[in-house]
Every structure is written in C-alpha cells, then in structure tokens.
Image (cartoon, grey):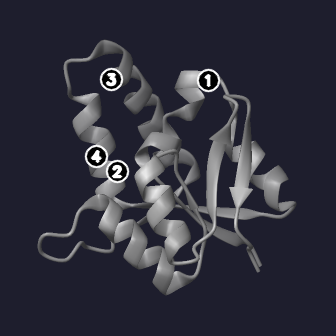
Amino acid sequence: MPVRVILDANFLMIPAQFQIDIFQQLTNLFNKRVEMIVLASTRNELQKIALGSHPKKKKQAELALKFVDGKCHLSKIKPKIGETADDLILRVAKKWRCPVATNDRNLRKKLRNISVPVIYLREKSHLALNGWVE
C-alpha cells in the first residue's frame, strides 16, 4: 500500500528552484510507492502565482503545475468558509493521518504541534522527514 503525502505549493516549486527530483526523493525516503496528493486549493495557489508578474516565480509555478497534472492525484476537498489553504492542509492531514511535504516554517510548526509528520527540503540538497510515518 502506498504512503499518501500531501504536497504544499512551495514544496512543488523545489524542482525549478533547486533542480531536485522531489518525486524520486519521496520514493527513496519511504522506500515504497508514494501517492502524491495536491489539494485543489494548492493547485489554485500555483495558478495565481503562474499568472503573476514576478518572472522567476511564474516559471517555477508553471513547472510545478506540469508536475501536478502529470504526477499527482488532485483532491477536490473544498475549504470551509474562511479556511486558508494552510488550514485546509492541516485539517486534511490530521483527518487522513498522512505526512505533509512543505517548506513553510509556520505550517511545519503547526503540523508538528498536532503530531503530523513533515517532509521538507534540507540544506537545499535532499528531503528530510520530521516525525513518524506508519
């Protein structure tokens, strides 16, 4: 059975920023098949960045969207009224009891406070896992 991992927008931009194959590294990290999940709100966040005016971020988001469409499972769970993308990730990760891949320091702290394992980029070269995954 594969490990389900929820991917955050900033994590999906790692390949364009640091030329790192996050998908292969996730598989290596767990030593088994990984089901990479992107919430619809995360995809929407990437689309907004891709339409923005910052050229570097725009290219990173466009590449991330290609990965989302080609390698990830899109979950259409809708946010509750007033719920941010991060709040939705927190809620879904807790409910599904699955790790979250993010580089957002605040989100990482909130996830660890509710005992959700976190995957993040370490030393701009490899992925690291903080927490226990069953």
Callout 4 secondary element? helix
Callout 3 secondary element? helix
Q: Which mark is residue 133?
A: none
**Which residue, given by chain and number where applicable, does mark 3 sit on?**
58
**Which residue, given by chain and number where applicable, does mark 4 sit on?**
45
Mark 2 or mark 3: which comes first in sequence?
Answer: 2
Contact (CB < 8 A) between labels 2 and 4? yes
Measure how far apart labels 1 and 4 are at the Cα level. 20 Å
Mark 2 or mark 1: which comes first in sequence?
Answer: 1
Mark 1 or mark 4: which comes first in sequence?
Answer: 1
In the displayed structure, would residue 117 be above or below residue 26? below
Measure how far apart labels 2 and 4 are at the Cα level. 5 Å
**Which residue, given by chain and number where applicable, does mark 1 sit on?**
18
Measure how far apart labels 2 and 1 are at the Cα level. 20 Å
The quadrant in which residue 32 appears is bottom right
**Which residue, given by chain and number where applicable, does mark 2 sit on?**
43
